[in-house]
Image (spheres, helix red, strand yellow):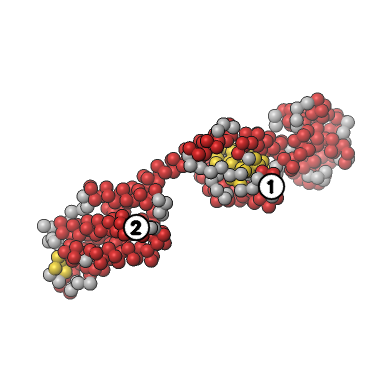
């Protein structure tokens, strides 16, 4: 019988059929393969001895046997053989073995088989050496495709289950239902505390470029955000994110009232790193809570983020202590309404209102205000005088500046800004 290369089969070196050489050396070959896996592929040296001597040894023997049959007949592995490899790869995926370790195991087996055969080749066997090389490559191609497909089919199933578990727990925590029972059903642990992030995410420049798919650019940005969240967390992050923001619950081993400044600083650094990696501004409100108190903490984090944005705080992480005054000023009530009334007349003159806001942002610096607004300093002076005439409050004076800042916060809160 001939294989695709035209060389008569079965192939032989020094007059002995190669499939017979492999079959005769099967125990020795299998042992060498297992030794190399344990010595050179870290995950295999952590497997129980029973598994190595049992299941893994059988898989190696099956692989060598399949290759020996291919040498004898020239035909690729059968469907039953492929199914066995696929199932074995799926088991390794379920055990958390990296795919590179699984594929490498088969390559180690092929290398040992090739070395076993080439050790008997003579100068007269050149044609068969070439044919064997072709068959080895064909075998590895078929094996790699089958193993990788089996591995990732199982991995996707596992990831799907993990994602379902995360979403179920996130929903239970945010809605205040039976989080403890939900965690138990999915085999998850609840930490003593969650650090809650309410995120508003800016638009990446790529999302507005002509010829670039906004959906693809947005998903790329979102993927980076998720990767960074997971990378900076010590545990499983529960999140519901979209292109413009969302919610993230980060496990913390500290009780809510004992979260340290250092831990908050780490979270602020994580948000800053997310901004750099994704290339967009991120405004984040943060709070901490025990699992049973997550619903109230989620509402607080969202409100803190809105207050920080309305009071023109810079992007980054903000907690209630950072915006205490603005937060209180923005609470509904007669005091807030009265404060807002002080500057409401300026809403009819947007250029005056914008100038007052800019002057406060710029630390009451006339020059910096002019630079930010791209106008002449005299224009700034004129607008601030007109605003003082209309409101009776001089934003260039310290005491009035504080009242104007508070009034603007109250105005923004009332308008939903």
Quarter of the figure with the N terminus: bottom left
Q: Position of residue 239 (x, y in %)?
A: 55, 40
Question: Which quarter of the picture shows residue 409?
Answer: top right
Which element type, helix, strand or loop, lies under badge 1? helix
Q: Is residue 298 left or right of residue 86?
A: right
Q: Residue at x 69, y 50 (%)?
A: 260
Residue 56 visible in the current orientation:
yes
Q: Label 1: which residue? A: 258
Q: Residue at x 80, y 32 (%)?
A: 407
Q: Position of residue 123 (x, y in %)?
A: 17, 74
For marks 2 and 1, give the CA distance. 46 Å
Q: Position of residue 363 (x, y in %)?
A: 81, 45
Q: Label 2: which residue? A: 50
Q: Is residue 412 left or right of residue 215?
A: right
Q: Residue at x 50, y 39 (%)?
A: 184
Nearest to viewer (mark 2 / mark 1): 2
């Amino acid at each position: 019988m001939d294989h695709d290369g035209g060389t008569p089969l079965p192939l032989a070196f020094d007059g002995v059929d190669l499939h017979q050489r492999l079959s005769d050396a099967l125990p020795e070959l299998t042992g060498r393969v297992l030794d190399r896996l344990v010595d050179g592929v870290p995950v295999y040296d952590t497997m129980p001895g029973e598994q190595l001597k049992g299941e893994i040894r059988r898989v190696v023997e099956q692989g060598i046997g399949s290759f020996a049959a291919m040498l004898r007949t020239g035909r690729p592995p059968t469907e039953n053989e492929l199914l066995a490899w696929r199932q074995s790869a799926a088991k390794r995926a379920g055990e958390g073995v990296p795919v590179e370790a699984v594929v490498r195991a088969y390559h180690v087996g092929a290398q040992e088989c090739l070395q076993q055969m080439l050790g008997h080749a003579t100068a007269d066997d050149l044609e068969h050496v070439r044919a064997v090389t072709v068959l080895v490559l064909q075998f590895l191609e078929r094996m790699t495709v089958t193993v990788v497909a089996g591995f990732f089919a199982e991995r996707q199933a596992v990831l799907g289950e993990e994602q379902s578990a995360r979403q179920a727990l996130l929903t239970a925590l945010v809605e205040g239902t039976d989080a403890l029972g939900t965690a138990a059903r999915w085999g998850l642990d609840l930490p003593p505390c969650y650090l809650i992030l309410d995120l508003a995410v800016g638009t990446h420049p790529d999302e507005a470029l002509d010829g670039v798919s906004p959906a693809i650019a947005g998903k790329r940005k979102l993927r980076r955000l998720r990767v960074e969240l997971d990378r900076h967390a010590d545990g499983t992050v529960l999140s519901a994110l979209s292109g413009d923001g969302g919610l993230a619950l980060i496990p913390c081993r500290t009780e809510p009232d004992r979260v340290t400044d250092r831990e908050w600083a780490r979270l602020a650094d994580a948000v800053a790193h997310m901004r750099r990696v994704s290339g967009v501004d991120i405004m984040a409100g943060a709070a901490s809570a025990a699992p049973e108190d997550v619903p109230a903490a989620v509402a607080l984090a969202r409100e803190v983020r809105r207050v920080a944005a309305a009071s023109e705080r810079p992007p980054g992480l903000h907690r209630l202590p950072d915006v205490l005054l603005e937060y209180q000023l923005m609470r509904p009530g007669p005091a807030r309404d009265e404060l807002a009334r002080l500057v409401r007349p300026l809403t009819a003159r947007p250029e005056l209102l914008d100038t007052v806001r800019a002057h406060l942002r710029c630390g009451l610096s006339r020059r910096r205000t002019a630079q930010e607004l791209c106008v002449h300093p005299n224009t700034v002076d004129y607008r601030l005088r007109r605003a003082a005439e209309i409101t009776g409050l001089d934003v260039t004076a310290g005491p009035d500046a504080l009242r104007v800042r508070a009034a603007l916060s109250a105005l923004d809160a009332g308008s939903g800004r």
